[in-house]
Image (cartoon, rainbow, N blue to C red):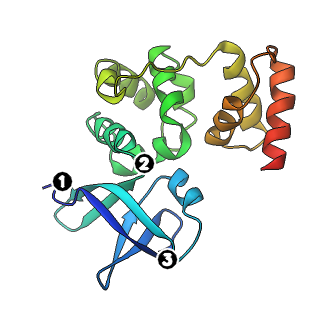
Amino acid sequence: MTHMIASISGSIQRIEPAALIIAVGGVGVRVFVPRTVLEDVGGVGRAIHLHTHLIVREQELALYGFETTDDLQLFEVLLGVNGVGPKVALSILSTLSPELLKSAILREETAVLQRVPGIGKKTAERIMFQLRDKLDMTQAGTAVPFVSDVDADVIDFLTGLGFSIVEAQSALQRLPREAKTVDERVQLALQYLDQG
């Protein structure tokens, strides 16, 4: 049943704080999406294609949508963790990039997960423990990028200034390798973020 609607294509009818209304054949379908999707949509009227997961409950049907099959698979793996429902799983994918999440799990950094709204220490530890064995399922044959201690400090600094972890991670990916110290990397990251 959860895979009954595997994907959705249509035009964006309305943008809500945590969802998109997508017009499909005369019907407006509400699809809950991570913040990263909301930031990328471009505006009402744009065409969009999302990979979806249908949550079936006694009182409601809720559709969750993702830009890539990797993100969808990660969402489904997170749903398999005790105590993690669709809203928490979506919050994780809204706050952490898949690369940062995987790196944190491999390095057992529960503090990274605790930055996600609604996740305390016990839930973070449970996610770490249960996802460690399932991580291979989400890697799609690629190595998990290693987030160095320096970059972890840079992310801490940038998020302390109010930038999201996704923004900080995006800035880090564009920094030259020559910039090795925390100070150098913070300065260059801030230049990139200011331009954005």
- Kind of residue indicated by mark 1: Thr
- Along the line of sight, the residue nearer the viewer: 160 or 140: 140
Q: Residue at x 56, y 24 (%)?
A: 111
The residues tagged by marks 2 and 3 sit, at their Cα atoms, a distance apart of 19 Å
Residue 161 in the figure: left or right of residue 149 = right
Residue behind mark 2: 90
Residue 23 in the figure: left or right of residue 187 = left
Task: Between label 2 and label 3, give the one nearer the viewer.
Answer: 3
- Kind of residue indicated by mark 2: Leu
The residues tagged by marks 1 and 3 sit, at their Cα atoms, a distance apart of 24 Å
Q: Residues within 10 Å of mark 2 (few under 14, many from 20)?
A: many
- Along the line of sight, the residue nearer the viewer: 64 or 193: 193
Disc on the earlier residue, 2 or 3: 3
Disc on the earlier residue, 1 or 3: 1
Residue 108 versus residue 121 in the image, above or below: above
Q: Are marks 1 and 3 in contact (CB under 8 Å)?
A: no
Coordinates of residue 20 in the picture (x, y in percent): 45, 68
Residue 30 versus residue 130 in the image, above or below: below
Q: Residue at x 39, y 42 (%)?
A: 71
Residue behind mark 1: 2
**Residue 139 falls in which quadrant of the image?**
top left
Coordinates of residue 159 in the picture (x, y in percent): 71, 37
- Kind of residue indicated by mark 3: Arg
- Along the line of sight, the residue nearer the viewer: 142 or 133: 142
Which label was assigned to residue 14? 3
Q: Residue at x 72, y 16 (%)?
A: 150
